[in-house]
Image (cartoon, grey):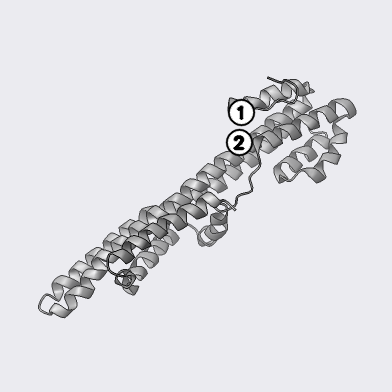
Amino acid sequence: MDFATVIGILGGFGLVIVAMASGGGLAWFIDGPSAMIVFGGTFGAVLINYPIADVLGVIQVAKNAFRGKEQRTAAVINQLVEMSKISRKEGAIALQRMIPGARDPFLVKAIHLVVDGLDPAHVSQILETELDFIGERHRLGAEIFTTMGNFAPAMGLIGTLIGLVQMLKGMNDPGSIGPAMAIALITTFYGVILANLVFLPIAGKLKTKSAQELLIKQLIIHGILSIQSGDNPRILEQKLHSYIAPRERRSRFYRD
């Protein structure tokens, strides 16, 4: 589990709730009509923007923001260097025994392509095409959350306008001013909270995780093509190190 995401959401909501409670009471901030306007309006607008299958799949996409298990670039580089050693000594067919230990389906597919004897141009084309579509799926997931983050405050503003109209219509009845004003203010509050503590942060985390995953897959493509070309494992390692920051580089062949 990604504890940074959990701590961020719980910490953000926790501090807001403490501030709300210290100002008089949490019950003041609970309003059914306001919640219906913000939640209903936001998800209705999202359904208009995207196919229903994409919207229903947003829950599965959201899980990625809370997953803590990520491939480490150093581990992937070491795995590719080991594959390079095996390929140079025993031939590409020997890479089959690396498949059971490969956790990434993308790496497994790359190994299969090499073992099947495809030429480097076709291997590169197939893997790059899959990488493009993976990036597109990730982009869509983050985009849906960004869209919800943009619509939520707008729905809050609509609720504010509804509340103000109700308040002005009931000016001759002082008892109706309070509930109408509550809708006017609390809907904006709900929209801003959802946008800035849930939707937009999750979209940002998804983009960050997507960038990391795509980097790993770029490493795999470059490494597999280098293995096919018969590069020395030392040369392969140096090529792959160019993808990561100097502080993260750990060579198996050179010691500082």
Asked whether residue 152 is in view, the answer is no
Q: Disc 2 on helix, strand or loop? A: helix
Tell whether label 1 touches label 2 (CB within 8 Å).
Answer: yes
Against 189, residue 209 (above or below) is above
Gap between marks 2 and 1, in whole Å?
Answer: 8 Å
Residue at image coords 81%, 43%? 99
Residue type highlighted by circle 1: Tyr
Give the residue number, with chain letter if any, for mark 1. 243
- Left or right, 141 with reference to 214: left
Question: x and y percent of residue 208 in the render?
Answer: 52, 42
Structural crowding at the residue carrying mark 2, measured as other residues with C-alpha within 10 Å and reported as few (<14), some (14–19) or many (≥20): some
Residue 117 on image: x %, y %: 83, 33
Q: Which residue is mark 2?
A: 215
Residue 52 vertical placement versus 144 (above, below): below
Residue at 36 percent across and 69 percent down: it is 35
Secondary structure found at label 1: loop
Is 48 above or below relative to 75?
below
Q: Quadrant of the C terminus?
A: top right
Residue in the image at 57% along x and 56% along y: 63
Identified at 72% across, 46% down, the residue is 105
Residue 233 in view of the camera: yes
Q: Residues within 10 Å of mark 1 (few under 14, many from 20)?
A: some
- The image quadrant that residue 197 belongs to is bottom left
237 or 55, which lies in front? 237
Q: Quadrant of residue 33 in the image? A: bottom left
